[in-house]
Amino acid sequence: MSTYLANAGQILVTFAFGAAMALFVLRLLAEFARVNFYNPICQFLFRATHLLVTPLRRFVPGIRRVSLAPLLLAYLIALLKMLLLVLLVGALPRLPGLLLMALADLLDFVLVLYMVIVFADALMSMFAVEQQHPLVPFVGQIAAPLLRPLRRVLPTLGGLDFSPALAILIILLARALLVQPLSDFAQHLALGALGPGP
């Protein structure tokens, strides 16, 4: 019975912390892509994260007018998430490994989120959707920084844009070749041979 409860707890932790991470990562991507601030989705993200991001911006430097405070908050959420997940299986993680596990988890989250965004943008460009819906420009503007350089080097064939497929392939390779080895190393560093830390 305790195993079932632990599994249920892991599902709840992953869902709740994933939703919180999505808010801060999407805000970061919106700032990076210069998404129209008057888009209702963008305004919701800024309102939902304002309370934590605004005071932190005084201490966290930005890059090219993009605040890194949302990224730091997303990392802290990932750190707490990984700690809870490890504790739910009855282990005590070592701090260096836990820090690295959170980094790998955040990287994977950003990659998967970007993959979903690129896929959604490709779908909306293929089918007739209401262009005035706030989701359409929001997704398109966030996907643009990744797709734009690929479109410069990848020719269109028969009017078809293959840049989303290439972007998704690159993301899948990054997950397999970068994130997974990092995650495996972090878990070994945090838990050793699946045993409790000191």
Image (cartoon, rainbow, N blue to C red):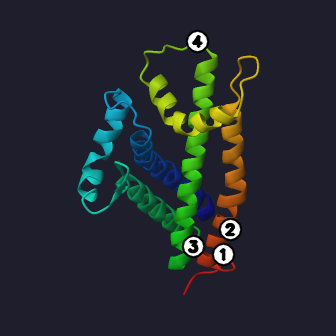
Residue receiving disc 1: 188
Label 3 vs 2, first from the N-terminus: 3
> Where residue 180 appears, x then y in whole percent?
68, 60
- Asked whether disc 1 touches disc 2, contact meaning CB atoms under 8 Å apart, the reply is yes
Amino acid type of disc 2? Asp
Q: Secondary structure at mark 1?
A: helix
Q: Secondary structure at mark 3?
A: loop
- Asked whether disc 4 touches disc 2, contact meaning CB atoms under 8 Å apart, the reply is no
User: Gap between marks 3 and 2, in whole Å?
Assistant: 19 Å
> Where residue 35 appears, x then y in whole percent?
40, 33
User: Gap between marks 1 and 4, in whole Å?
Assistant: 48 Å
How many numbered badges does the structure rendering display?
A: 4
Residue receiving disc 2: 184
Number of residues whose C-alpha sits closer than 10 Å to that of mark 3, classed few (under 14), some (14–19) or many (20 or more)? few
- Asked whether disc 3 touches disc 2, contact meaning CB atoms under 8 Å apart, the reply is no
Which residue is located at x 27 percent, y 63 percent? 59
Residue receiving disc 4: 128
Q: Reply above or below: 8 against 187.
A: above
Query: In the rendered image, which quarter contains the N terminus?
Result: bottom right
Q: Reply above or below: 8 against 113.
A: below
